[in-house]
Each structure stands twice: as C-alpha cells, then as structure tokens.
Image (cartoon, grey):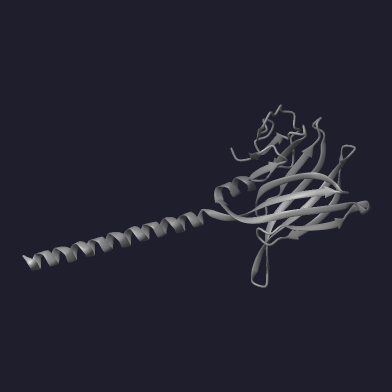
Amino acid sequence: MKVFVYIFIALSLLFSNIALSSAAKSIDGLEIKEELLKVKAVEYGFDIDVNGQSVGKATTQLAVGVPATITFLDENKNETYRIRLTAAFHEKESTTFPMVSHTVQENAGGSWVELLNADVAYRNDIEGSIILFGENSTEVAIKGKTSTIQVDRNVIQKLTNMSCDDKPSLTDEISDVGILASSGDCCGGVCSTGQYYKCCGAITCCACDAGCCSTMR
C-alpha cells in the first residue's frame, strides 16, 4: 500500500509538473505572440510659441515614419497654424532617443508659409525646449516631452494606408471631440476658448482643453 501511495504521489507530481510546464509554454507563446503584434510608437506632448505667442498645445501619439498634421483654427474656423510631425528613433552611443521632425506653418492670406523645419531629439519622459529662428527672423520656441509606447501593429497599418493630403475643412458643428464627418481619416474638437483643432495621421490627438480624439474608428 505504501509503495502504491508513493508511486501515486510521484505520478501526480509528474503530471502536475508537465501541466505547469505546458501552461508556462502556452503563456510564453501568448506573450511572444502579443509582442509580435505590438510595435513601438511615440507619445509626444508639445507647446509651440511663435514670436512669444502660443500657437498651440497638444499631446499626440505618433506612429514611427507616418506623418501627422495638427491644424489650429480660430473662433470662425479659419486655419491659423499647422504643425506637421513625424516620429523616429535616433541611436547614439548605444542609447535610443525618440526624435520628432517639426514643420511649423502659418496661414498667410490663404496660403501656407513655412516658418520652420527642425528635428528635435528627446530623452524619454524628460521635458526639453529649444528656440530657433525661421523665415524673416521668426522666433519659434518648442517645448516638449516624449514617451516610448507600444501600440497594435494593425493600427499602424491603418495609419500607413490613410491619405491625408486633402485636409477637410472643419465644417461640422462639433460640440465636443470626435471623428469629422467630412473625413474618416481626421478628427477634431473645439476648445473652451472657442477655437478649434483638427488632427490627421496620428493615432490620437489631445489638443487645448478639448480632450482627446482618435482617427481610429
């Protein structure tokens, strides 16, 4: 009887170990699968001033290599400034830094005039600032902070397939934030100041105090 009990216990422990090992492998497999479905992206919060006046403040999630555009509008929905952002990762001395390419444009008489084009590299979660001089000695101050995030790969594929060349006019009556009816690729909102913003090509945009909108349906 004792031999049977010992053998039974030994077999039970063996089967338990096999089950645990299989479960561990299954969990590891799921983790590996989830990792394969994720890619790195950049969350970027920034504030841009032109000649001492705030152009716009926003936080956005950027897919690497996919251009995003945030356009700010006045109370009458006239476009005032446009910021094009493209995220990348820059390696230096075995350290990887998020880098954001900025193109700052001003609407002058219905035409977009480029004020500045600059690449800025940040250390993760550390605020950085820079003052540059663009066209006609225009002073452009950029203050920002980045974080490296993980997003679903299929989200990046959707963004990559978007065509954001034709920016829709913000003709929709927006009371809060959301997808613009004029384009499934863009979203926007209204600020408490009465001004507006619209966003295209980013995963999410959080501008002024309007909350966040997403280009993902």
Does residue 9 appear left or right of residue 188 in this picture?
Answer: left
1 shown above or below 198: below
Residue at point 71%, 26% (across, down): 173
Quadrant containing the N terminus is: bottom left
Which of these two is toward me, 160 or 109? Answer: 109
Q: Position of residue 157 (x, y in %)?
A: 59, 48
Quadrant containing the C terminus is: top right
132 shown above or below 59: below
Residue at point 82%, 53% (across, down): 141
Which of these two is toward me, 184 or 137? Answer: 137
Residue 117 visible: yes
Q: Position of residue 154 (x, y in %)?
A: 55, 48
Residue at point 65%, 36% (across, down): 184
170 shown above or below 135: above
Which quadrant of the view contains residue 53? Answer: top right
Does residue 117 appear left or right of residue 156 in this picture?
Answer: right
